[in-house]
Image: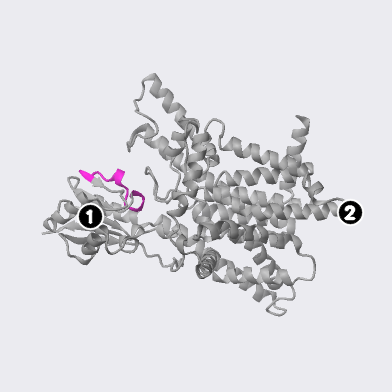
Amino acid sequence: MKATKILIRERCNYLAKFIDSDIAIVLGISFALNIIGIWWGLPSWGGWAPDEIRPEQVLSGATSLFSDGWHSVYPPFHYYILSALYIPLYLPLLILDKLGFVEIQTPIVENSTTGLFHFTYLGCFLLGRFLCVIMGTATVFIVYLCGREISSKQEARISALITSLLIPFVYYSKIINVETPYIFWFCLSLLFYIRILKNHRILDYLFFAATSIIAICTKDQAYGFYILTAVYILISKYFQDKKYNREIGWLQSILDKKIIYSVFLSIILFSAIHNVIFNYSGFVEHVELLVGPASYNSSDFLARDDNNWMQHLELFWQSVKNIKFSLTLPMFIICLLGILTSFLKKRNNYLKLSLLVPVISYYLFFISIILYSRTRFLIPICIIFSFFGAQFIAEFLLNRKNFFGQSKLISYIFVCLLFGYMFAHSFSVDLIMVNDSRYIAETKMDSMIPSTSKVLGIGLNKYLPRTEYRKFEMYTSGSDELSATEIKKIDSGYYDYIVTTSAFDVIQRFNESSETYKVVKKLIDGNTNYNLLFQEHFQAKWNLLDLKGVSSNINKINPAIAVYINKKNHE
């Protein structure tokens, strides 16, 4: 117990000595950017973000203790954390139900929009999102700690600031997606990776093993970072051992207790988190889903049957465009220059260049295998690039011998403009989230469409105005494709109103031979029983986001909402 207290005190002292007013400002900026728009699409049952973990999914797993075949497209670790947050909110409701004061069929699937359950569900949604806000801000601080291990305080602060302003990072740090949580654990493992390369202490090995496994158990794709990284650590350890014992061999170095204990901890932790003993069938189903539909059905960028070097060049170019978008073009160029100058440095730059090992590993063993690239996949790579961008800014823009001669004022102005430009882009995410066109469309629908109307929404629920709060006689939506019955009803003029969304762009998504495509094309062209009633799409003067050629779910924010009215109602 005493040893534990001493260890905790040492860790607290370690963190305290790194905190100053400058990093506090960076963390404040990160927190503000992350929390603005946290209410986006709420209250609702599914939210507006693709792949967001709904509270009902967490509660469903919790009621089965994540056993008996429970599985998801994501590993279970973040579900455990969310369930620990949600269950205390639901316990009073369940107790009241048992005592007969309230009556609910189930706290998981009931779809009421009023009452205790409604507010409890909304509270869970906000709590889950707030956790990501905290983890996102904490990630910025971990990046700062990593920077302090390999560079100056100034560089560490700059790399933390770059991370806080990454465009997709700001978006994912306010929704219940596993992106921010797994990046948090990855950055923590990166810190211990750096410390291993510096000192090769057993505690750092164990912490690296634990945090890397947790990252993988939060989102499977994190495995890609650690394949070459683990090999690199073994090589580094061998050469370090060689300094103290020239007779040591590879096998003897690998069979050291640091490695054995780390491997043992990794296996135990992985098995425990996946609940392999009590949920083996669920674990198998998760793996089958991962290597099957969750992988193949998503590879919309390249065809697996035609996997050639030309397409890999296209994949690489798509990744470059995604990284450039995330960092903004000026900062992307700065980071590339930082990488180049790091290789050209005369003095030892071993630790910083070692950060590129996880990048290469991830690209080779994940991106080039799944054969498609999204901005969210590349956030960790952007974070690692930030260390090199910070180095270039500190050494060539803020020191005495800079690009602008002896005028430090010009250098400071240039750096301020650089970060101001990056901030404007990341703030644009918040701007379009809080002004999402669906808010305006919902207000108009409630005032212009009678409650006795029959309304059809074309597209997924999460991309449309919220169905559960529109009190119409009928408001149906949620299918990927229109059914034959729905198409027949559209042709006959059965629906009073039809709602479409650019977030589920049928014209781009479907082949021209598709019946859904044909009906929507006729609707847009005015060749049906419906006329355009109104269209809403928020156009911000300060929105600098250009998603052309970029593969990102950020394009699901602020879609154009078009509402069509039956001609007989318009006469």
Tell me, what colour scheme is on the image? one colour
Whether residue 302 is situated above or below residue 193 in the rendered picture: below
Secondary structure beneath disc 2?
A: loop
Where residue 165 appears, x then y in whole percent? 56, 60
Which residue lies at the image location 68% right of the left edge and 54% below the top edge?
A: 229
Q: Nearer the viewer, mark 2 or mark 1?
A: 2
Task: Tell me the quadrant of the picture where the C terminus can be found.
Answer: bottom left
Q: Amino acid at mark 1?
A: Ile
Q: Nearer the viewer, residue 172 or 348?
A: 348
Where residue 352 appears, x then y in whole percent? 72, 61
Q: Nearer the viewer, residue 233 or 435?
A: 233
Mark 1 crowd level (few <14, some 14–19, many ≥20, 10 Å Cα): many
Task: Tell me the quadrant of the picture where the N terminus can be found.
Answer: top right
Secondary structure beneath disc 1?
A: strand
| Disc number placed over residue 432 in the picture, else none | none
467 drawn magenta: yes
> Which residue is under mark 2?
246
> Which residue is under mark 1?
498
Q: Amino acid at mark 2?
A: Arg
Could you tell me how far apart the alpha carbons at marks 2 and 1 are, in whole angstroms? 77 Å
Which residue lies at the image location 21% right of the left edge and 51% below the top edge?
A: 484
Where residue 561 appears, x then y in whole percent? 30, 58
Q: Which numbered disc, 2 or 1, marks the residue that appears first in the sequence? A: 2
Mark 2 crowd level (few <14, some 14–19, many ≥20, 10 Å Cα): few
484 drawn magenta: no
What's drawn in magenta, residue-wise? 461-474
Q: Nearer the viewer, residue 41 or 29?
A: 41
Q: Is residue 245 left or right of residue 103?
A: right
Where residue 43 appears, x then y in whole percent? 38, 44
Whether residue 459 is situated above or below residue 3 in the rendered picture: below
Q: Is residue 450 visible?
A: yes
